[in-house]
Amino acid sequence: MSWSFNAVGNPDALRRALDEYGSSLGETSPDNLSRQEFDEAKPHLQGLLSAANQQCAVLLNASGYASKDYSTGVVTPQNISVEIRQLGALRT
């Protein structure tokens, strides 16, 4: 199961976009592994955005995937990749 989020904007707009993206993955449930994986990563992504310069445009590329052992129900993250880059000052 996997998820991928890519966007450019000011940090506040990207935090709102993360909320919208999470909703687009469907309801949180034991069978929706993509949503579970994203929900676990989201607070960390929001923290990175909070630390970014709020007056600059930011590029955020993030993705992840995990596997599930169906005999035990354990979900194990396999890879999470994050790129966050400050692009430049926003014009007012």
Image (cartoon, grey):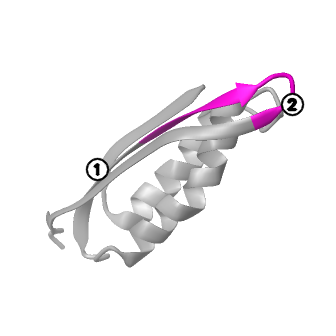
- Which residue is pictured at 70% across the width and 41% down the height? 36
- Which residue is pictured at 72% across the width and 37% down the height? 75
Per the image, label 2 sits on a secondary structure element best described as loop
Counting residues from the start of the chain, the first of labels 2 and 1 encountered is 1
- Dot 1 corresponds to which residue? 8
For residue 30, side relative to residue 92 (left or right): right
Height in image: 18 above or below 37? below
- Mark 2 crowd level (few <14, some 14–19, many ≥20, 10 Å Cα): few
- Dot 2 corresponds to which residue? 72
Location of residue 35 by image quarter? top right
Along the line of sight, the residue nearer the viewer: 27 or 47: 47
The three-letter amino acid code for the residue at tag 1 is: Val
For residue 22, side relative to residue 48 (left or right): right
How many badges with numbers are in the image? Answer: 2
Percent from the top left, x then y, of residue 9? 30, 56
Percent from the top left, x then y, of residue 16? 51, 56
Height in image: 75 above or below 43? above
The three-letter amino acid code for the residue at tag 2 is: Thr
Q: Are marks 2 and 1 in contact (CB under 8 Å)?
A: no
Residue 72 sits inside the magenta stretch: yes
Marks 2 and 1, how far apart at CA:
39 Å
For residue 82, side relative to residue 65 (left or right): left
- Which residue is pictured at 72% across the width and 28% down the height? 68
Height in image: 48 above or below 27? below
Per the image, label 1 sits on a secondary structure element best described as strand
Percent from the top left, x then y, of residue 50? 43, 74
- Which residue is pictured at 45% across the width and 35% down the height? 4
Which mark, by number, is residue 80?
A: none
* Quarter of the figure that contains the N terminus: top right
- Mark 1 crowd level (few <14, some 14–19, many ≥20, 10 Å Cα): some
**Span colored in magenta:** 63-74
